[in-house]
Image: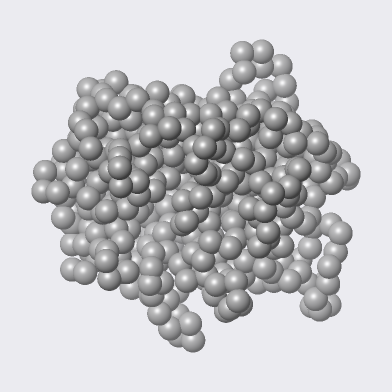
Amino acid sequence: MDKPSLNLVALSRNPDGSYPVQVNGQSSDPRNRESFFKSVQWSADGTALFASSSANRICTFVLPETLLEPREEPTRLKAQGTLVLGESTSAIAPCPYFALENPSTQVILTASNDHPIHLHYAFPQPLSSDGSDTTPTSSPTQPPPLSSFRLIKHETEAYLPITSLIWPAPGTHFIAGTTNRIAIYDVSRPDAMKSEPLLTIATIPSTRHLSKGNGIGMRGTVSALAAQVREQGDAGLVAAGTWTRHLGLYDLQRAGACVATWGIADAAVEAGVGGRGVMQIVWSPCGRYLVVNERGASGLLVYDLRGTNKLLAHLTGRDGDTNQRLSCDVFPGIESVGGFEVWAGMKNGGVAVWEGVGNQEGAAAPSWDWKAHESSIGSTAMHMSGSVLATCSGSWKLADDDDGTATTDSSDESSSEESEADSGSETSSSGSSSGSSSASSSSSFNSPFIVEETSLKIWSIGPGKPLDTNSSIEYAEKPER
């Protein structure tokens, strides 16, 4: 298949939303910003984007109806909702039945270390000191969360770190991952939601024995979760991955029974892609294959789950040697090619695309790629229509770093993984999905870190000769106030 045309139709260079970050008492210059976009997700109805930033903000961008209409310059996006969190979030999960015309569905789950899981409005109305609605120019007093959900280690009464979080369709339950366990919460009745898990699935038989499961199960912090979507529209199997490089399949229809567990370290070595722990898991649109995205890996692993759980292929040619989270997305392939497509961002600011995944075994090079940003691409999210793509970029860099090595707020993950591999203990500080901490975020403004480029971009995808995306990137360099 020929490379399609790519056109930049909308962008934002403001990861702080409606309330700018204060640096030494003054708002940071958008051209020399010290926060950046970390991730972006589409809403269930495809009308909005949820973007998280290193400044502990979650911004909701509602896309205009005229998004794809011809224009001379890209549309400047402005956040319609800005959720300011007190701590850095390790995972977010938007409502799976979000509808722009129904305010009761416009909610999002957030998880932070040493805190419960919170349910927030995606468009919060800030409060003044007397409790009335207001529209301040600085960071406001956020309304309290709609609900809270606890995951506590009963021996110490400490909050367990939530390192992964998904809210699959039809939306009656959500699933959280932590050290050596998976928790399922019931949210089917908004008027009677319980703060405790409905079901807790231990990924190893015991954490008290010295052998930590004695090779049975999947030991480690559950750093990635993905639900298989069946034809009925509900979740089937749930795939889980750990920082200790293991995968597991669990059947929610059978009270979370473990279907299979296996390690991926040997397969990654054989494929030559490297990796330092599972960061993301994505089901193929057909539900037969599993794409495994590891931190620091130069490629992606594709497993065939039809009985054998064997490595089918590995997708090569990706610049991913960084501690930063570089997520990917999938989309059904066209009929003439078959299989499915994988879109993944890279450290060098490019996006690589593999077509026909699932049709062949062994190594598969990218079908094509293009330069979308000038820094690491944290997220690549495909719209349900397949004609619009969202990407976001940004990373911290040492001010005197001449070799261009990026230092991001995910650097804590490596130490977490190594300590976990030795002990496997349930500590409140092990294995954060984003690896960030409130200390690293709050102290970043007094550290020698800079952000050279950060942006959220929306691309239209269509047939024909590719456009010169370099000219589109020039639009993003204009200051945004």
Q: Residue furthest bottom?
A: 191
Residue 199, given in percent of the width and then of the height, sits at 30, 69
Res. 238 visible in picture:
no
Residue toward you, 164 or 461:
461
Q: Residue furthest front?
A: 464
Residue 187, given in percent of the width and then of the height, sits at 42, 76
Left or right of 145? Residue 428 is left
Residue toward you, 303 or 475:
475
Res. 227 visible in picture:
yes
Q: How is the image coloured?
A: one colour
**At 61% across and 13% down in the image, what residue appears?**
403
**At 55% across and 25% down in the image, what residue appears?**
348
Residue 277, given in percent of the width and then of the height, sits at 36, 35
Q: Quadrant of residue 32?
A: top right
Residue 468 drawn above or below residue 171: above
Tally of marks: 0
Residue 315 drawn above or below residue 185: above
Residue toward you, 389 or 224:
389
Q: Residue furthest right?
A: 26
Residue 345, given in percent of the width and then of the height, sits at 50, 35
Residue toward you, 140 or 468:
468
**At 73% across and 37% down in the image, what residue appears?**
476
Q: Residue furthest left?
A: 307
Q: Quadrant of residue 368?
A: top left
**At 60% across and 71% down in the image, what residue appears?**
100
Residue 361 drawn above or below residue 153: above
